[in-house]
Amino acid sequence: RKEVEQDPGPFNVPEGATVAFNCTYSNSASQSFFWYRQDCRKEPKLLMSVYSSGNEDGRFTAQLNRASQYISLLIRDSKLSDSATYLCVAYTDKLIFGTGTRLQVFP
Amino acid sequence: DTGVSQDPRHKITKRGQNVTFRCDPISEHNRLYWYRQTLGQGPEFLTYFQNEAQLEKSRLLSNRFSAERPKGSFSTLEIQRTEQGDSAMYLCASSLARGGDTQYFGPGTRLTVL
């Protein structure tokens, strides 16, 4: 079983839609959590950190539930430019990535 | 551009050849990480350094792989006797020791083994 698990998708949504990604992690010692965005054949880039209190950055909202070891990302009002792979990440002394969830936003 | 650079960006080699990749981290960062990413997967941890000390190596890092960071600045990753299964994107990231979770990635070296 992978240490960080997420649905690989793809999620195909129209512009303006709201889409939610979920992920679970197995190592309860994980210290911090992130969502990264990765465009095709590029390096991963940090999208946002994830906290138990929840955090929002514009159209993006992330949430951590430590009790159920569950992380979510909500994207509101999807744009064509949001099309990418979204990687769920847990950190102990290194980053542990999920396989990524592919999002395709269509006009 | 995060300030982490990798060279070369692409490498095509024949099976059995040796290859070496270089990573230059952000100058004040004392931690340097190597990850490998294959198609359809997320990046997987290979190894990391704090200054010149190699602190952890993944089981993925077979004895054909060696990494160095001799002066605590740039790092090299060498793969000996390459195999087709080594074809992947090799990513380097750097961070401060305090705040090691905030890692900045380089553009990666894409290796193709024929």
Image (spheres, rainbow, N blue to C red):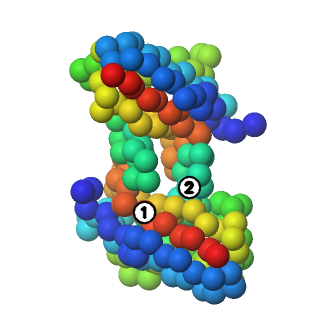
- Up the image or down, A94 lies above or below B54; here it is above
- Up the image or down, A73 lies above or below A40; here it is above
Pick out the residue farthest to the front: A107
Q: Quadrant of residue B82?
A: bottom right
Q: Name the one closer to the observer, A43 or A70.
A: A43
The kind of secondary structure element at disc 2 is: strand
Q: Percent from the top left, x then y, of residue B104? A: 35, 53
Badge 2 amino acid: Gln
Q: In the rendered view of the protein, which quadrant contains the C terminus of chain B? A: bottom right
Both marks 1 and 2 on one chain? yes
Pointer 1 or 2: first along the chain: 2
The kind of secondary structure element at disc 1 is: loop
Badge 1 amino acid: Gly
* Horizontal relation, residue B97 to residue B111: left or right: left
- The answer to whether one can see residue B45 in this image is no
Which disc number belongs to residue A45? none
**Residue at (69%, 85%) from the top-left corner?**
B16
Q: Percent from the top left, x then y, of residue B64? A: 69, 78
Cβ atoms at labels 1 and 2 below 8 Å apart: yes
Q: Name the one closer to the observer, A86 or A79.
A: A79
Dot 1 falls on which chain? Answer: B
**Residue at (69%, 62%) from the top-left corner?**
B60
Q: Name the one closer to the observer, B29 or B35.
A: B35
Q: For mark 1, does the 10 Å Cα neighbourhood hold few (<14), some (14 to 19), or many (20 or more) residues?
A: many
**Residue at (30%, 24%) from the top-left corner?**
A79
Reading the image, the residue beneath label 2 is B37
Instruction: Find the distance from the CA under tag 1 to the CA under tag 2.
Output: 10 Å
Q: Percent from the top left, x then y, of residue B67? A: 54, 76
Reading the image, the residue beneath label 1 is B108
- The answer to whether one can see residue B47 in this image is yes
Q: Percent from the top left, x then y, of residue A88? A: 51, 34
